[in-house]
Image (tube, grey):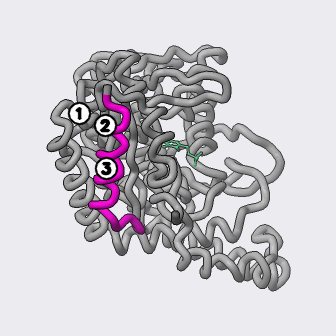
Amino acid sequence: MGEPIYLDHNATTPLDKRVLEKMLPYFTDVYGNPSSIDHLHGHKAKQAVDEARQSIAKHLGCRKDREIIFTSGATESNNLALIGTFRRNRCNGKHIISSAIEHPAVLDTLKYLESEGADVTLIPVDQFGVVDVDALQRAVRADTILISVMYANNEIGTIQPIKEIGEFAKSKDILFHVDAAQAVGHEKVDVYDMNIDLMSFSAHKFYGPKGVGGLFVRSYSPMVRLDSISFGGGHERNLRPGTLNVPGIIGMAEALAISERLRPKEWERLRGISASITDALKETFPEVRLNGHPEKRLGHNMNFTIPGVEAKALIHVLKGELSISAGSACSTTKVEPSHVLNAIGLSDEETFQTIRLGLGRFTQDTEGIAISLIRGILKLKR
Ligand SMILES: Cc1ncc(COP(=O)(O)O)c(C=O)c1O
């Protein structure tokens, strides 16, 4: 039997071989430190990083290249955006608004900020996982300094009304951070058009390397200022010290360029595959429910509750054929019900009967996937 089909692209994507090709010389040939610009080796590396920054900035709708700060990924970007904004703006207020379905990289950071004196309000979502914008507007206080809402959810794929929230935040002079880890490379993202002030992204979610990402920090209307949260050098406008991951940055720029080129067709293709899989499943098991918004969702994400079938058991049964994940969050010691699924109204029991499928660029065999799923479910159905 060959390798199982990889269907966990919301967790991470494989590195596109074209990206690897582009990265390779930056491990062995162009190995200078981009901060060492007094010699040719450093200069070449800096030039490559500058070009990568320019390309990424252009694809995300930035006004200036320098609005992109390179980091190790979306977790670090979220930490820098939230902690850096809070510390810098502490004198203006301590209230932060976010949503109940954010990734732990946001929720845990907000929890930490409470220990520094932040007041955090988490806005509920509706049954599809869409943030209640009225509740968000009502939650604003005189001391609200930041709103942080994810672009698209990593479990159920729901896309938030980012532009609408951005316009509202701007009208109230409140900074707006977006965790776009699941959206960049998959959805059309334009930071200025959407009134975004800070935006986190991560290369390994769009066929780039792991361990590299970025934070967009708006430089114009308003000029956003952050406190650095780590120390040790003047890199990245003093916001993120440390020698830059040159091959990673080159890879991220190439991965984004490829993703943007392929995006419209790829989105349609993946939406088509997910519709066929959903239809096939529902035809055999009418009780299966697709979680998340029926339309406003990532083209490559599916999240199903299958009543009567334990997700963990199904994953185990399918292990040889499909690599899928459960709808519950795993810590090292225990399995917790997913806060996202709970927030859209699922009971704990239902969350344990929920699986996530993430399609990707190299996913082809729709029929094989549906057949494997149906066979697996039939084996376990009570
Ligand atoms: C919405 C969201 N935010 C943040 C992250 C963390 O990204 P990274 O792995 O780059 O730290 C992820 C990854 O799972 C994510 O899906």
Name the magenta segment's main secondary structure. Answer: helix
Tag 3–tag 2 contact (CB < 8 Å) = no
Which of pointers 3 and 2 indicates the residue nearer the eye?
Answer: 2
Tag 1–tag 3 contact (CB < 8 Å) = no
Mark seen at residue 298: 3
Q: Nearer the viewer, residue 376 or 94?
A: 376
- First-in-chain label (1 vs 3): 1
Q: Is residue 7 magenta?
A: no
The percent coordinates of residue 106 (x first, y second) are: 53, 32
**Amino acid carrying mark 1 in the image:** Arg
Instruction: Decide if residue 327 is in sight here.
Output: yes
Q: Secondary structure at mark 1?
A: strand
- Residue assigned mark 2: 304
Cα distance in 3D space between marks 3 and 2: 14 Å
Q: What segment is highlighted magenta in the picture?
A: 361-381
Instruction: Decide if residue 99 is in sight here.
Output: no
The percent coordinates of residue 83 (x first, y second) are: 61, 31
Question: Eyeballing the image, is 122 above or below 7?
Answer: above
Which residue shows up at 49% across the image and 72% down it? 55
Q: Is residue 371 magenta?
A: yes
- Residue assigned mark 1: 289
Question: Eyeballing the image, is 270 above or below 216?
Answer: below
Q: Secondary structure at mark 3?
A: loop
**Amino acid carrying mark 3 in the image:** Leu
